[in-house]
Amino acid sequence: MQSTMDLGNASQIASQIIEPIDLTTLESSEMELNAPVLRIIGKAKLSGHVPISGAKNSILALMAGSLLSSEGCRIRNVPNLADVQRMSDILETLGVKISRNGEVLDLDTSNLTTNSAPYELVSKMRASFFAVGSLLARLGSAKIPLPGGCAIGARPVELHVRGLQSLGAFVQIDHGIVHAHAMSPNGRLQGAKIYLDYPSVGATETLMMAATLADGQTMIENAALEPEVIDLADLCMAMGAKIRGAGTSTIIIDGVEKLHFADFTAIPDRVEAATFMVAAAITRSTLSMSPVIPAHLTAAISKLQDIGVTVRQDSDNMITVIGGDNYRAVDIETLPYPGFPTDMQAQFMALLTICDGNGVVTETVFENRLQHVAELNRMGANIRLKNNVAVVTGVPQLSGAPVMATDLRASAALVIAGLAADGETTVMGLHHLDRGYDRIEEKLRNVGAKLYRTTEAIPV
């Protein structure tokens, strides 16, 4: 969807210039001693095939959903990510027995020992809060700290709380801990009709999980449409849940007594796939990637084509991106699925920095998800920012520079920018990158990128 901003007034509306981070005065918490950095030698041409891993945003919800089963489940296509390990650590504190063999994760949930997850783990990852719905449904009570994760916005849990209350739970937040228990005499939640003020993915998934074991029928209206919601519903149904309408705005769940074991394969990561699509475009290269589900990539494909990039569907699960010589700026506005994903805003902004003309990027989902603007400007980009609107004026060439990743997708955007930049780019804050991209350096090197991870001193 095109932004409604008048480009003629763009320079006046977005006159605020954000200063880049001063790398000489960063606090020690941001510059850990010997923390690894990623050195990228730009201008390398990419060519070949990129394998796409399982979807991070789906896997974490699937792991939380496993708690609903009295037997457990096997999840296939699991990427090797820091967030997956963190979620595993959280589930193990609840009594789940977890074993991993390559991309296969086995979770034995037959003996949950506690309904409480530790603050030091939950505070590091937003998705861990999803366990509140499955714990409440399975055990009748839950005690979960308020979530953490990337500092990209408030991401409140009110929708989760109100929905759980509609299902008959007493919920109280005390000193950052969410206490919840089912108020019915039998300790089970009760089916209800729930309307979400905003189609939140997290709230939709939390409430869908909670409703699978509730007494009676639950209807969730204005539900999120994301593919990851469908994937979670498919796992729950494979374990015996009765769910219909996932992927539409109305999801209906008929509660069942218990769920059983299932062997389930997660969907491929649409954000990872789209990130490599942009990497091909910004380096004016040709890359193919699989497995993908092209229908999940409609918004990204459409914007790339508008910019002047060729995207070819080679099969049901493979696409090829062919970069061009002349790119034109486009406007981007982030929206819930099937709109343009907020998780791709930073990467596309990196591409817009070398497109002809002015592009307007409007972030409507997370209010703090434009912190990468300053770092792209450090690399020679021309981006002006005011509130949640960035005006990107294309430049002929980016230049390598030391930059700091501020969140997961910003880290990917800086890597992408470094691939196209003239000279060497050093990306710091790799703990963000490791949360969401499985072997990204290896995958990029295999198609011709010149980059390596090191703990050597950073040039300032």
Image (cartoon, rainbow, N blue to C red):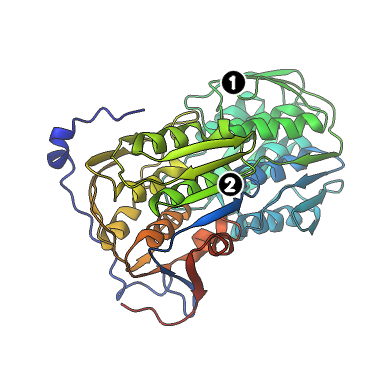
Instruction: Please name the amino acid that badge 1 sits on.
Output: Thr
Left or right of residue 234, residue 370 in this image: left
**Front of the two marks 1 and 2:** 2
Residue 320 coordinates in the image, percent (x, y): 53, 43
Q: Is residue 254 left or right of residue 295?
A: right
| Mark positioned earlier in the residue sequence (1 or 2) | 1
Q: Secondary structure at mark 2?
A: strand
> What residue is shown at x 48% (from left), y 69% (from top)?
451
Residue plotted at (38% across, 45% down): 348
How busy is the neighbourhood of tag 2: few (under 14 within 10 Å), some, or many (20 plus)?
A: many
Residue 360 visible in this rendered orientation of the protein: yes
For label 1, the residue is 248
Tell me residue 146's x, y (percent). Answer: 55, 48
The answer to whether residue 188 is visible is no
Residue at numbered disc 2? 289
Q: Amino acid at mark 2?
A: Met
Q: Is residue 321 above or below residue 203?
A: below
Classify mark 1: helix, strand or loop: loop
For the residues bearing labels 1 and 2, Cβ distance under 8 angstroms: no
Is residue 401 left or right of 193 when viewed as pictured?
Answer: left
Q: Residue furthest bottom?
A: 457
- How crowded pointer 1 is (Cα within 10 Å; few <14, some 14-19, many 20+) is rated as some
Q: How many marks?
A: 2
Residue at (39% x, 51% y) in the render: 282
Front position in the image: 352 or 153: 352
Where is residue 189, by image quadrant?
top right
